[in-house]
């Protein structure tokens, strides 16, 4: 093949079609557990996190809800995946060899949000959320002063019927700063592949040891391959059907496919290499801890904590 701009435009068009087809054909899971937030700057401050407002009887003046209770910021980051094609492969009509590589770029670009969001699950035992506590913590505080109470959305028990029930109770028992129920009902259990059998028994079996399984259908099951090799005893129970989900995917710039093929471009001029790749600008972070319960599975015996206790005040 003669390497000229017409040939290079044809190659780029072909690669872009292959990339886009692979991108569109791959399914993702992050939308189920994360809220998509468009971003217009280098970072976004989520001051509105910390409260779950709900209607009240209108007596007297309106009560203005203060949505500036936190100072939680998610900074956008740049991500890329790039490959080079030697001029000799174009001259020798070997472009067909790069089809699976471009397909892989499209697949990886589509799954990129999954990778960001699902890393938040095991990271939640350490990384902080809007209240300055680890996302999964035993001492999240609701309210202030004498009305302050501490709640736990963290456990250490291995997945079992008793542990699952205690986690479900912990979420459903949560109240706001006024003591009113948040009316949260968890609907999704996420496990690593190592916990799939136990999770299926809890949520799908009609009977367990000859007894009717009353936990059947109380949540959907998601077996996340993204959690393989990352503390596979951990498991997570989430509430995903509210407008604000447990996690946030922040998108500054959608994935784009680019080329660097000009004769005066540095890689072409210096190394006879043509560059193709995808890039995006985005990040993921934590939403409302009230929507999630996580157990690190470190203790095979101890059931997870639930409910709240009065928080000592000065």
Image (cartoon, rainbow, N blue to C red):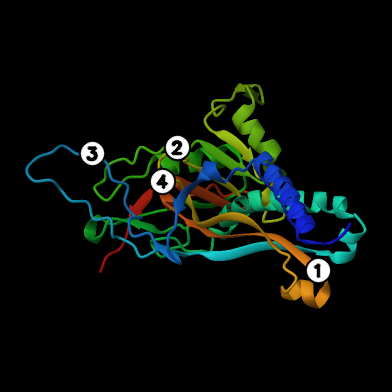
Q: Which residue is mark 2?
A: 241
Near mark 4 (Cα within 10 A), the count class, few <14, some 14-19 or many ≥20, is some
Callout 1: few (<14), some (14-19), or many (20+) C-alpha neighbours within 10 Å? many
Q: Which callout, 1 or 3, points at the residue further toward the start of the chain?
A: 3
Q: Quadrant of residue 44?
A: bottom left
57 or 282: nearer the viewer: 282
Residue 64: mark in rendering: none
Q: Which residue position holds label 4?
A: 244
Q: Residue at x 28, y 60 (%)?
A: 68
Find disc 3 in the rendering and name its residue.
Answer: 55
Q: Nearer the viewer, mark 1 or mark 2?
A: 1
Q: Which image quadrant: the N terminus?
A: bottom right
User: How far apart are the alpha carbons under marks 1 and 3?
Assistant: 62 Å
Sequence-earlier tag: 4 or 3: 3
Q: Earlier in the sequence, mark 1 or mark 2?
A: 2
Q: Is residue 240 above or below residue 47?
A: above
Mark 1 vs 4, N-terminal side: 4
Residue at left 43%, top 43%? Answer: 171
299 sits to left or right of 87? left
* Label 2 element class: loop
Coordinates of residue 269 in the picture (x, y in percent): 78, 75
Q: Spatial distance from mark 1 to mark 4, Cα to Cα?
A: 46 Å
């Amino acid at each position: 093949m003669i390497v000229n701009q017409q040939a290079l435009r044809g190659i780029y068009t072909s690669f872009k079609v292959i990339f886009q087809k692979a991108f569109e054909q791959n399914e993702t899971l992050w939308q189920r557990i994360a809220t998509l937030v468009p971003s217009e700057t280098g970072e976004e401050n989520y001051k509105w996190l910390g409260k779950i407002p709900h209607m009240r009887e209108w007596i007297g003046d309106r009560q203005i809800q203060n949505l500036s209770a936190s100072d939680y910021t998610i900074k956008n980051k740049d991500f890329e995946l790039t490959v080079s094609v030697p001029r000799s492969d174009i001259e020798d009509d070997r472009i067909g060899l790069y089809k699976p590589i471009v397909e892989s770029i499209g697949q990886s670009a589509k799954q990129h949000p999954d990778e960001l969001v699902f890393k938040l699950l095991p990271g939640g035992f350490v990384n902080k959320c809007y209240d300055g506590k680890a996302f999964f913590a035993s001492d999240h505080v609701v309210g202030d002063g004498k009305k302050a109470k501490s709640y736990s959305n963290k456990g250490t028990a291995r997945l079992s019927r008793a542990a699952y029930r205690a986690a479900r109770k912990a979420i459903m028992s949560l109240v706001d700063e006024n003591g009113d129920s948040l009316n949260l009902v968890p609907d999704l259990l996420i496990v690593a592949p190592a916990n799939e059998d136990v999770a299926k028994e809890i949520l799908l079996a009609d009977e367990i040891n000859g007894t009717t399984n009353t936990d059947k259908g109380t949540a959907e099951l998601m077996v996340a391959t993204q959690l393989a090799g990352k503390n596979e005893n951990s498991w997570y129970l989430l509430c995903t059907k509210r407008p604000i989900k447990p996690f946030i995917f922040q998108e500054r710039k959608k994935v784009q496919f680019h080329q660097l093929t000009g004769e005066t471009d540095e890689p072409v001029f210096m190394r006879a290499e043509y560059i193709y790749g995808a890039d995006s600008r985005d990040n993921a972070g934590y939403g409302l801890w009230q929507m999630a319960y996580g157990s690190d599975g470190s203790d095979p015996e101890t059931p997870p904590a639930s409910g709240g206790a009065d928080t000592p005040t000065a």
